[in-house]
Image (tube, rainbow, N blue to C red):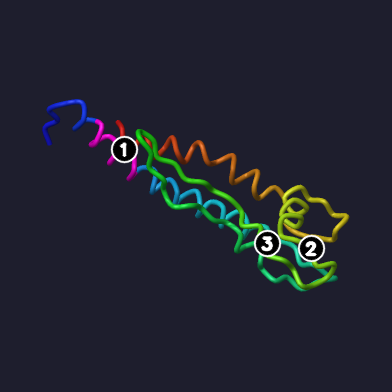
Amino acid sequence: MIIRNEAQLKKAMMARLEKAMEITRKEIEAKMYEETGNFYTGTTPKFYRRTGALGDTPNTTSLSTGFSSIHFTAYLDQTHHYTTGSKPYMSDVLKWANSNDQRHGIIGRSGFWDRAEAEFQSILNKNLKAFFK
């Protein structure tokens, strides 16, 4: 492809950026699923039965393209409301589980969101480097 002007250059770069960002979005979502899934490994609660709802919380928005930017949002879905125990909201459970707040009896591998979030920048950098050598 021969680029003849600034508009063509911008169009070509935005197309590559969109591909890099879509791969990044998928990899970040996979990392979030990995970390929330690992919450359940190594421990078994004695006083409650796990529903697995926390493992279903990772989500990303689709890519949004602006004038000269592309972005998405990675988040943990907080709309679930438990019907067991004290019937907590998912937003509270996520906070307690991530911080290892044992006052609420949640047992698992804490820090899942912190670990996932710590990887976001390196995932983005790796993909941008691959598409823009």
Q: Quadrant of the C terminus?
A: top left
Chief secondary structure of the magenta portion: helix
Which one is nearer the viewer's eye here, 10 or 115? 10
Q: Compare marks 3 and 1 and give the one earlier in the sequence.
A: 3
The CA span between labels 1 and 2 is: 44 Å
Instruction: Give the SS element for disc 1.
Output: helix
Q: Which residue is outermost to the right?
A: 103
Of 32 and 67, the residue lying toward us:
67
Quadrant of the drawing holding the N terminus: top left
Give the mark nearest the N terminus, 1 or 2: 2
Viewer-proximal residue among 37 and 88: 88
Q: Secondary structure at mark 2?
A: loop
Q: Nearer the viewer, residue 37 or 58?
A: 58
- Amino acid type for the residue under numbered disc 3: Thr
Task: From the image, state whether disc 3 or disc 2 is nearer to you.
Answer: 2
Which residue corresponds to the image point at 46% horizontal and 50% vertical from the top-left?
27
Query: With 76 as the anchor, is 105 left or right in this view?
Result: right
Q: Position of residue 47 (x, y in %)?
A: 85, 71
Mark 2 is surrounded, within 10 Å at the Cα level, by few (under 14), some (14 to 19) or many (20 or more) other residues, namely some
The residue labelled by disc 2 is 88
Type of amino acid at the residue the image marks with label 2: Pro
Please give left or right for residue 23 compared with residue 95 in the image.
Answer: left
Can you tell which mark lies on residue 131?
1
Name the front one of labels 1 and 2. 2
- In the rendered view, would you say 43 is above or below 120? below
Q: Tell me where residue 10 appears, x and y as whole percent.
A: 25, 31
Total number of numbered labels? 3
Q: Position of residue 22 (x, y in %)?
A: 38, 48
Q: Earlier in the sequence, mark 3 or mark 2?
A: 3
Which disc, if any, is residue 41?
Answer: 3
